[in-house]
Image: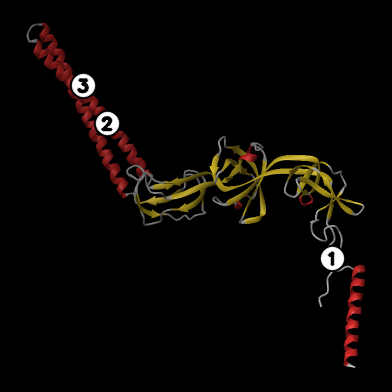
């Protein structure tokens, strides 16, 4: 009895398995439909891509001809300052003392010049008198020569005094410039990028310091923003000033800034065994103020627009051995057709020959078991 029951159970399982395969052949499971697209004519925009750094048109590091303690520095990084505006004030005591010393030195030089001129005039009169006496035979030639030498020395003293006066004038001019530079002004209208010092610190002058002076702050004109990008030598021949470009930065991935090529470096440089050329792109977008100096930027330069090009999706182009082609649907079945491809923008590829406008091409992977449109079926495991 138990044996007959066991045999009946096996028979039921076999019948159920047969029914499963019978119905699964008519109603496929896990079928993956073939993906296709039509070849169509359109516009192909070719771009050269590079990355670079955002830079302002003008960026300077401000120093001072004066030295001393900072007594006022209220601005911070990011503040807009106008040309001629006082940004930093130094304690003027030291520079005032130097200016007074230079003024005194100038007065002394003027007095010495005046004295030398009086002496020269006196020796000139004496020389004229000695000449007369020599002509009358009253004095000897030696006495006349001594008078001439004295005149020449007096003339030299005048020249020396004039040089000292000139030096004193320049020293006073420099001292006054240093005194004026205790109030450090913005050289142009722009934005403070970084403060290197702050109130209470003592800075050194650019004139008297062996280290070329203390850096006080850096500033830039952010009205004109540029991106300097390194373009591969493969693409550089297609890039010219005036071409349109787009700039994106990681901080604002959703925003593409309009730009234009400003200039192309005439000489390349080697970067990690690759030759690149520096291309300067000017950002002309109305929201360029969002870009900050130092940001890493991706640049796409529009090098060519091909109109009425026959295009297929890039993934439709496949390789079969050494041949490039596409799978075209013919009578519902994919057939490999060799094609001559042109340029690509990363999404679409130009087809020069082999495919006609309107042909339906396969974009899915035909190498998969389901790539030819046939369904896949589940198996049963006992």
Q: Is residue 151 left or right of residue 320?
A: left
Nearer to us: label 3 or label 1: 1
Picture quadrant where residue 353 is located: top right
- Mark 1 vs 2, N-terminal side: 2
Q: Nearer the viewer, residue 33 or 159?
A: 33
Query: Residue at the location (32% across, 34% down)?
Result: 170
Residue appearing at x 89%, y 74% in the figure: 20
The residues tagged by marks 3 and 1 sit, at their Cα atoms, a distance apart of 115 Å
Secondary structure at badge 3 equals helix
Residue picked out by circle 1: 376
The residue at the point 91 percent across, 75 percent down is 18
The image shows residue 174 at horizontal and vertical percentages of 34, 39
Mark 3, residue position:
155
Which of the 4 image quadrants contains residue 164? Answer: top left
Q: Quick one: quadrant of the C terminus?
A: bottom right
Q: Residue at x 25, y 37 (%)?
A: 105
Q: CA distance from mark 2 to mark 3?
A: 15 Å
Residue 165's tag is 2
Using residue 193 as the reference point, say whether residue 337 is left or right of it. Answer: right
Quadrant (top left, top right, bottom left, bottom right) of the N terminus: bottom right
């Amino acid at each position: 009895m138990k044996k007959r029951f066991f045999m009946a159970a096996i028979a039921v399982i076999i019948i159920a398995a047969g029914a499963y395969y019978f119905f699964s052949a008519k109603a496929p499971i896990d079928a993956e439909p073939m993906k296709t697209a039509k070849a169509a004519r359109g516009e192909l925009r070719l771009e050269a891509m590079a990355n670079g750094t955002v830079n302002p048109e003008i960026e300077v590091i401000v120093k001072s001809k004066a030295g001393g303690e900072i007594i006022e520095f209220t601005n911070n990084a990011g503040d807009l300052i106008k040309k001629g505006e006082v940004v930093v004030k130094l304690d003027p005591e030291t520079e005032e003392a130097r200016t007074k010393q230079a003024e005194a030195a100038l007065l002394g030089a003027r007095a010495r010049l005046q004295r030398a001129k009086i002496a020269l005039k006196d020796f000139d009169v004496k020389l004229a008198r000695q000449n007369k006496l020599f002509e009358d035979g009253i004095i000897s030639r030696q006495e006349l020569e001594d008078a001439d030498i004295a005149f020449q020395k007096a003339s030299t003293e005048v020249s020396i005094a004039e040089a000292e006066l000139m030096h004193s004038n320049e020293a006073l001019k420099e001292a006054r410039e240093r005194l004026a530079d205790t109030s450090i002004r913005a050289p142009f209208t722009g934005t403070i990028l970084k403060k290197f010092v702050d109130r209470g610190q003592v800075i050194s002058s650019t004139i008297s310091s062996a280290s070329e002076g203390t850096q006080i702050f850096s500033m830039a004109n952010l009205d004109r923003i540029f991106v300097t990008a390194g373009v591969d030598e493969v693409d550089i021949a297609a890039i010219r000033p005036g071409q349109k470009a787009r700039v994106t930065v990681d901080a604002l991935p959703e925003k593409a800034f309009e730009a234009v090529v400003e200039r192309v470096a005439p000489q390349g440089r080697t970067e990690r065994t690759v030759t690149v050329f520096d291309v300067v792109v000017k950002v002309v977008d109305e929201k360029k103020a969002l870009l900050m100096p130092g940001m890493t930027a991706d640049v796409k330069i529009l090098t060519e627009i091909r109109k009425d090009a026959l295009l297929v999706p890039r993934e439709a182009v496949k390789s079969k051995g050494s041949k490039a082609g596409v799978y075209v649907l013919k009578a519902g079945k994919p057939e490999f057709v060799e094609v001559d491809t042109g340029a690509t923008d990363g999404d679409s590829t130009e087809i020069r020959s082999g495919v006609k406008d309107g042909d339906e091409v396969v974009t899915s992977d035909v190498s998969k078991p389901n790539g030819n449109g046939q369904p896949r079926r589940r198996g049963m495991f006992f």
